[in-house]
Image (spheres, grey):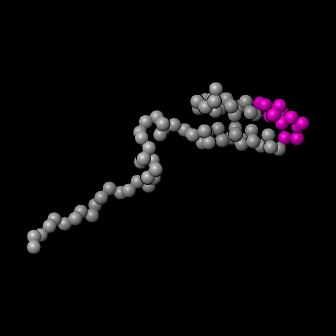
Amino acid sequence: MSASAPLSTASAAPSSNLATDLKPPGTASAAVKPCCVCKDEKAARDECMLFSTAEDPAQACSGTVERYRACMRGFGFGS
């Protein structure tokens, strides 16, 4: 029998997030998601719309909604 070289036990550690390893590199993988930006503005908008006692919550909360939209436009979402 011939002696074989010992197997190396040192190997690259697996990535902790395998899904990101599958994404192609570039701007698409680095872009922010709409759900992850403007969280404070979104919470204020939602609270205003859901708990408004006005007859027309959309009109009563228009300033809050516009602040949220402006924030989202700042990140490149919407028109």
User: Where does the image place residue 40, in percent across and percent down from the top left?
Assistant: 68, 41
Q: Quadrant of residue 38?
A: top right
Q: Quadrant of the N terminus?
A: bottom left
Q: Residue at x 80, y 43 (%)?
A: 50
**Quarter of the rendering occupied by the C terminus:** top right
Residue 23 lies, in percent from the top left, at 44, 44
Residue 24 sits in quarter? top left
Based on the picture, tell me whether residue 16 belongs to the magenta stretch.
Answer: no
Residue found 45% across the figure and 47% down from its top: 20
Q: Nearer the viewer, residue 10 or 26?
A: 26
Q: Residue furthest bottom?
A: 1
Image quadrant in which you'd find residue 37 = top right
Q: Which residues are magenta?
A: 52-63
Whether residue 68 sits left or right of residue 51 in the image: it is left
What is the total number of numbered labels drawn onto the structure image? Answer: 0
Residue 58 magenta-highlighted:
yes
* Residue at (88, 41) in percent of width and height: 53
Residue pushed farthest right? Answer: 55
Residue furthest to the left = 1
Expressed as whole percent of the image width and height from the top left, the position of residue 45 reads: 74, 38
Q: Report the side of 6 relative to 23 (left or right).
A: left
